[in-house]
Each structure stands twice: as C-alpha cells, then as structure tokens.
Image: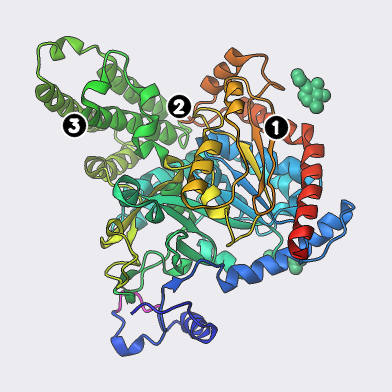
Amino acid sequence: MSKGNTGLPAAAVCLWLVISGALSQTSSTVEEDEAPCESYIRQSYSMCDGEREYINMRKQIVVEALSNLGIDCDEETIPRIAFLASGGGQRAAVGLVGSLYQLKKANLLDTVLYLGGVSGSTWSMATLYGDPEWSNRMDDAVRRLSSPGVELKQALDWLTERRNDNIFSLSDIWGVLTSAGIMKQLDTRHLSDESCRNATNPYPIYCAVEKECLHSGPTEGKWFEVSPHEAGFPELGRFIETSLLGSKFQGGEMVEKMPEMDMVRLQGVLGCALAHGETIRSHSPSWLNITEYLDTASKYVHMYNTLQYLIALTRSTINNPNSVDAIEKLQKILEEKVGENKAEYLKAMTTEEKARLVQQWTYDMLPLLETWCHSLEEGSFKKHMTFLIEQLLPLIVKWEWGTTQNFLYQYEDSSIPACLSGERLHLLDAGLLVNVAYPSFLGDKRDIDLIIAPEYSAGKMFETLTMGRDYAAEFKKPFPKVDDEILKDRDWPKDCYVFEGKEREPTIIFMPLFNRNNSKDAADIKAKMNDFTTFQPPFTQEKLEYLLETAKANVKNNQDTLLNEIKKAFRRRLSKQGQ
Ligand SMILES: *[C@@H]1O[C@H](CO)[C@@H](O)[C@H](O)[C@H]1NC(C)=O
Ligand SMILES: *[C@@H]1O[C@H](CO)[C@@H](O)[C@H](O)[C@H]1NC(C)=O
C-alpha cells in the first residue's frame, strides 16, 4: 500500500481535487475507485515540495537582508538560520514577541528562514501569523498583546460549534480559553491557508508530541511537527497534508474528509503542558506527600490545577464586577477544599486505601462547581457558566487531551510503531519531551547553520540544551558540543551563550530571559521566575510590558554577537558549498 516518495504529478492531481472540491464533500465516504491519488501519506525524510518552494522564495528576502548588513551572498550561499523559541506559557508567548520586535529593529529578522515553536511560543506564533505581513508590522503585533480581548460569550459560541465533534477534548476548552484569555483573540483560520502565502515571514513549524509514543513507544514516534503544508512524524518520515490532519484514514486511504482544525484548537493542542505531570511538584498542596502514591495523587493535583487555571482564564474574559466576584468566590471554594489539611485521615491507612481516598477527593471537586453554578443569580452569566461547566465536567472526568484522527491507522508499513496503531492520535505539548523545537531542525532535512534560541523555560536552566543534545545523540544528528561546565551557571546564567558548530553542526545562540545582565543574583532570578510562573492568571499590563522590555533588551544587548555569528555561519556555509 505504501508507496515511495509521492511523485509530483500525483501530488498535483491531489491538489487539483482538493481545489475542485471533489474530496471535500463533508462526511461522505470516499469510494475505492474514487481515490485516484497514489498515496495521501508522504514517506520521506526530505522537505515537501511546498516547503521547498516557500524556502526558495524566502531565500531571496534573506539575500537582500544580508546584503543590507554587508554580507554579500546568493541563494546558494546564505547561512540557513532558524529562530527556535522555547515554551513557557504566557512568559514565552510574550517573550517571543519582544525578541522578534527587537530582531526586526536590528534588521536581523529578515535573515531568518524558519520560526519553530513549542508550547507557549506557538500561542504567539499563531497570533503573529494571523497577519500575513507581521514581520513588517511588529508594532501591531506588540499592540495586539494588550488588546481588549474576547468576551466569554464569544468563546462559548466557539465551543458550541465544536462540542459535537467526536474529537472534542479538554484541549478544545484549553485552546479557546488561552486564546481568549491570553492571546485575546479567537482565530478561526486554518494553518494550511498559509501554504499559498509569499515569503514575507519566516516559515513556521509548530511542534507537538504523541502521547502513546511518549509513554511507551520508540523515540521515532514521539515528535510531531505541523507546517502550513504538512503534518507528521519527522523521525518516521511519514506525513499528511496539513489540511487533511483530522480526516479519517484507514490503511492509507481517506475514509472520511473532516474539517481541518482551526488555530484555536491547534493552540490548545500544542500548548497544554498542564495536561501532564511535569509541572505538578511545584503545584501540590504542602500537606500531601504525593511521592508515596504518585499516580492517584497526581490526578488529584492535576485536576485541581487545571480547574483553577481554566477558571482564572475564564475570569479574564469577564468585565462585570459581580461576575468577577462570583468567579473569585469559586476560586476560593476550590482553594479551601484542597488546602484543608487532610493528612490526619491518611495516617493509619494502607497505600491502597490512601489511593482510593485521594481518588474520591478528586471527583469530590466536581460537584462544587455545579453547586456554585446553581447558586448564581439568574442571568446571562449563570447561563454561560452552566454551559461551560456542562462541557467541562465530562471531559475532565475522561481526562482526554489533544485528540485527532490517526492518518497512519492500519497503514500497512512495518516501520510504524505499535504506539501509533490506534484510530486516533493524542497530541500534547512538545515541552514534555524537549521544550525547544530542536528535533525538527537538526540534520539534513532543513540543513540549518545557525539556531537562535531565546530561552523562556521554567525548568532547570540549560535543560532544553542538554535534552536537545541527547536527542541528537540518539539519532546521530549533528549538534554542537555542550560542555557540562556551563551547568555551573545554572542558577545565574549569562545573557548569551554561543555553542559553536563545526562542519555539519549548527551553531546555537542560547539566550536566557532572566540573566546576569538583568538580575543581580541567583535569588533575584528565582524571584522573577516566581513572579512570572508558567501557570497564572493572564499578566497585568505592567507585567506584560516588563517582560516585553526584558526580551527586547536581551536581543539588543547581544545584537553584535548575533551579527557576528551570522557572518561566521555564512563562512561555514561557503566552505560547505565549496566541498
Ligand atoms: C506578500 O503578500 C502580501 C499580501 O498578503 C502583499 O501585501 C505583499 O506586498 C506581498 N509581498 C511581496 C514581497 O510580494
Ligand atoms: C548589560 O549589557 C549591556 C550591553 O552589553 C551593558 O552595557 C550593560 O552594562 C549590562 N548591564 C548589566 C547590569 O550587566
């Protein structure tokens, strides 16, 4: 069934059929003999034609930008630069806009071929690319961060339209509330709409991980990337057109065409780190020793954190002071319930009994929401909250995230691992594997010379780098030498590190958000991280501006280093081409 690299004519036929609408009769079963394409699934470790064309166009812009900086090159000899923003919730989303703003000011933005994101940085990528000319309008992009926002009613209308989809999951509620509450817009575009754009902006790559493979599969099945042209597993070399991600496939044939996910849903899928256990330790009530029965206690703490975060996001979509009061009351009710020290109850119990009791507590939180809702005064707020809670509760109980159809379902190909045998995929925040999109940018496929990596993560400093290094080692991909010596700087890092690439390795410029240049010592950095934790109610205007300025200053203070490394990357590229 699976064929090699789909030939160009077949791809052209596919495209024509999509355009002519022959494949888009919604929910109709495609008959065997109506499936004229050689294969929907592209099997390759190289770029697809669409990306190649885009990159060729983008190279012309890069040539011009470099020429303005005094670097004389052509499309063949330009250094290939990727800007890879780390995750980190709203801190990353805002930080990325600040970094890009300053990059533009320094005339460096147009030297960048790719923009790769995970988690929080994908939230602002989705918003940026809502403007086809964002690279030339960074002032607008900054302004949009402080726009008045979206009202709850609009967010609920979005949910109303999608709640009957059979792939509705918690990520949808997550996506709509982060879009409305943090990015202050609901963007119902589709990523594939960008496939016909000109190359005014760097080419965007959004990353995720697949849940089953993350837990039990080989690393090949874990990393997932989505571009305007295609979506799939780079290490397996299996892709589908982005517009078909979400359609039902069986044995490599499309059995039902479904609408592509919009940017709101995509944002929910890509940036849902709280769906997972990694963030749990810092968020658990102090009386609860979760290491003892990690599994059930994790669920308990997760559910609490998720509810609180979703409620905080909801609050930011509301203006009426009475409704705000009511929401704050709900936050308190939950806080008191979980904060109440119940260690006494657990004392004499066996581990199993404890686990059972904690599980009970987990579900005891849910009726509190309903009771609170019933107690509200009649009116539109009550109506809206009733609807939201009705949608939320069953999904919270199922705890299902990031659901979409699996285009590799029953695909006859022995290299597809068992973790991808299900009818559906569950795509999660890529930060659960590596909080920077290195996996998509190492090696021959995109052949990158220079990676600019602003670091907004909350984890241990340099962890994204060492994890990227380990990932590269596993797949024998080039990665610059990262000496463990730098770990000494972990608590109080410099503002810029250059890990120099030799020959095939890219150079990485690693730029921590909080650093020696803007924080007086390790304690100060810690305090700043606490002030800007990943999961908190949307930032106030003051915090937002502080973060923007911090990110801008970091690029500004290091723009000579950036330019210098671009020049070196150019020389490496020249010698590579010469070989
Ligand atoms: C790119 O497309 C936009 C419209 O989306 C247009 O305004 C702009 O002039 C185009 N740029 C180039 C370089 O063609
Ligand atoms: C931050 O970096 C800039 C530029 O290198 C420098 O002028 C400034 O003194 C630095 N500030 C601190 C507090 O280190």
Left or right, 551 with reference to 530: right
Q: Please tell me which of labels 2 and 1 falls first in the chain.
A: 2
Give the position of the N terminus as an image quadrant: bottom left
Q: Which mark is residue 321?
A: 2
Q: Position of residue 500 (x, y in %)?
A: 70, 42
Q: What whole-number distance in Å separates the C-alpha atoms at marks 2 and 1?
A: 44 Å
Q: Residue furthest bottom?
A: 33
In the image, which residues are magenta?
Answer: 24-28
Query: Callout 1: 10 Å neighbours few (<14), some, many (20+)?
Result: many
Question: Which residue sits at x=20%, y=12%?
Answer: 343
Left or right, 293 with reference to 195: left
Question: Which residue sits at x=41%, y=50%?
Answer: 209
> Is disc 3 placed on a helix, strand or loop?
helix
Name the dominant secondary structure of the magenta segment.
loop
Which residue is nearer to you in this view: 531 or 41?
A: 41
The residue beneath circle 1 is: 496
Tell me where residue 273 sits by quadrant. Answer: top left
Q: Is residue 143 visible?
A: no
Question: Which residue sits at x=31%, y=54%?
Answer: 168
Q: Is residue 410 visible?
A: yes
Q: Nearer the viewer, mark 3 or mark 2?
A: 3
Whether the residue carrying mark 1 lies under 8 Å from ligand 2 is answered with no
Q: Which mark is residue 479?
A: none
Query: Callout 2: 10 Å neighbours few (<14), some, many (20+)?
Result: few
Q: Nearer the viewer, mark 2 or mark 1?
A: 1
Which residue is nearer to you in this view: 526 or 145?
A: 526
The residue beneath circle 3 is: 363
Q: Position of residue 165 (x, y in %)?
A: 30, 60
Q: Amino acid at mark 3?
A: Tyr
